[in-house]
Amino acid sequence: TIVSSVYRTSYHFQPPHNWINDPNGPMYYKGIYHLFYQYNPKAAVWGNITWGHSVSTDMINWIPLDIALNPTKPFDIDGCWSGSATILPSLNKPVILYTGSNQEKHQAQNIAFPKNLSDPYLIEWIKPDEYNPVMSATGDINPAQFRDPTTGWMGSDGYWRVALGAEIGGVGMALLYKSKDFVRWERADKPLHSPRGSGMWECPDFYPVALEGKRGMETSLNSEDVKHVLKMSLGETHSDHYLLGRYDEEKDMFIQDNEEKEKNYRFWRRYDYGNFYASKSFFDAGKERRILWGWSNESDSKPDDIAKGWAGIQTIPRMVWLDENGKQLVQWPIKELESLRRKRVHFHDIELKAGGLLNIKGVKASQMDVDVEFELPSLEKAGPFDSLLALDPQVLCEKGNFSTQSGIGPFGLLVMTSLNKDELTAIYFKIFEAYDRHVVLMCSDQRRSSLRPELYLPVYGGFVDIDIEKERRISLRTLVDHSVVESFGGEGRTCMTARVYPAFLVTSKAYLHAFNNGSETIRILHLNAWNMAKPSINVAQDQFLI
Ligand code: FRU
């Protein structure tokens, strides 16, 4: 039987019990961060879906509140599914749009308002019968694939827009709806975007990012100085992909950047190449940044989840912005997380020879934040990059492992490692030489993460889009929190979240190592590892924020 407490996270968002999935309606309103989430109040498996609700002033410590949306109406009696919040600027009032599933399991979008705007926590929400549902599946829309409205944005014509996910004729797309008053909605003639290639789009997200700098912007903003991000969650592969482009207001369409066009959706860029799904962003007006939340599902079995009494976490909120190269997003854990850093272990200027292994002692390796920067003296020994085999980075990572010697790399970190190393999770880089450039591969290999049976033990892989010839260095930051291993490669250009359940954790402590299994010496410029404190997350308390 499973010992629940060793896998339960300390600094990731979870309710005390039961199942959670998608983050919903995140917002910053009157000095308070709100997070809603798909929640089954009755069990640790999906079902009876409601909107759980918590509030915070730092997105690290959370106060649990009553369930915000329960299935109480004919239009949501089968479940209150995902949706978003929009703050109506003229009234300074938040509204929620969410998907209701009815008795026939038909989906439609509904609106909810705070019952009492003077309640700083916005605990109670009402779903006015006179408006709901506000968008129904008519015409060619399949009512079983019609859900997850975005945050609204206003065009210069004064009309509100939202996008939502649908599948029409087997093609996944973001449908566009328009409204003058936010309660009466009409479907636009054309979808916001519908490239052929993938099935149903769940949880679309649509927002501007600045061409320069990390500053986030309000969702309605559109100008010459921004690009737009369109994100979709693809159920078949359980992966969140994004496209970069422009929002053409005239056509009322998202126009994808040309050079980035790729028909095969498997190669669309991802926020995270691991277990990270149904994400949603919001504009944090307090700190002028865009924040991204994503759900990380368990990788253990359903019986394990029932035995643990809980399933699902939210990843650490990430700030998101456009890379200097204009071709990809960069993500980084919010600064506030660093307030949990305690005792630090520090190394600098260490040579890691071929086959070198550095045991990093003095840190609690099952609850830590580790950040390392590697320097590569020479790229000469980089192995050849077979571009025919190499289209799919995950396949490349599956072919090797952390001890397969190649020219440069693998080098990286071994986390959640048992004393005799029969259980470990390896996060590492490898550098290849293609005919015109060097290619950096990042892997997170969970195959040896646990000896327990019935676990899903995948290998994750992604390319890191940096100019390694010029930089000659690459960083890796990994957040370890009991069953979570959340990694940020190349300063947040490639992210991978993994869930691990090592057997040794029940009885013994975890170890952390840096390693180099390439044939070339590399340097650790610096390595910092911090013990992480446990914040107060969803434990009932009589302390109030305001
Ligand atoms: C994504 C999703 C959404 C849906 C919700 C139901 O994980 O399937 O499309 O609204 O979860 O819980």
Image (tube, rainbow, N blue to C red):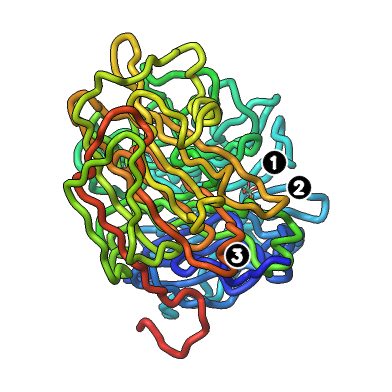
Place of residue 174 in the rendered image (x, y in percent of width and height, measured from the top left): 55, 34
Callout 2 touching callout 1 (CB < 8 Å):
yes
Picture residue at 51% right of the left edge, 15% below the top: 389
Q: Earlier in the sequence, mark 1 or mark 3?
A: 3
Q: Quadrant of residue 102?
A: bottom right
Question: 184 or 494: which is nearer to us?
Answer: 494
Which residue is tagged 3? 51
Place of residue 181 in the rendered image (x, y in percent of width and height, measured from the top left): 48, 52
Q: Residue furthest top?
A: 435
Alpha-carbon span between mark 1 and mark 3? 22 Å
Residue type, label 2: His
Question: 538 or 291: which is nearer to us?
Answer: 538
Which residue is tagged 2? 106
Place of residue 486 in the rendered image (x, y in percent of width and height, measured from the top left): 44, 51
- Disc number placed over residue 503 in the picture, else none: none
Q: Secondary structure at mark 2?
A: loop
Q: Earlier in the sequence, mark 3 or mark 2?
A: 3
- Crowd rating for badge 1 (residues with CA inside 10 Å; few <14, some 14–19, many 20+): some
Q: Earlier in the sequence, mark 2 or mark 1?
A: 2
Picture residue at 81% right of the left edge, 55% below the top: 103
Residue 179 drawn above or below residue 368: above
Residue type, label 3: Trp
Q: Secondary structure at mark 3?
A: strand
- Crowd rating for badge 3 (residues with CA inside 10 Å; few <14, some 14–19, many 20+): many
- Disc number placed over residue 137 in the picture, else none: 1
Apparent side of residue 481 relative to residue 70 in the rendered image (left or right): left
Q: Quick check: can you spot residue 38?
A: no
Quadrant of the image for the N terminus? Answer: bottom right
Residue type, label 1: Ala
Q: Quick check: can you spot residue 236?
A: yes
Q: Secondary structure at mark 1?
A: loop
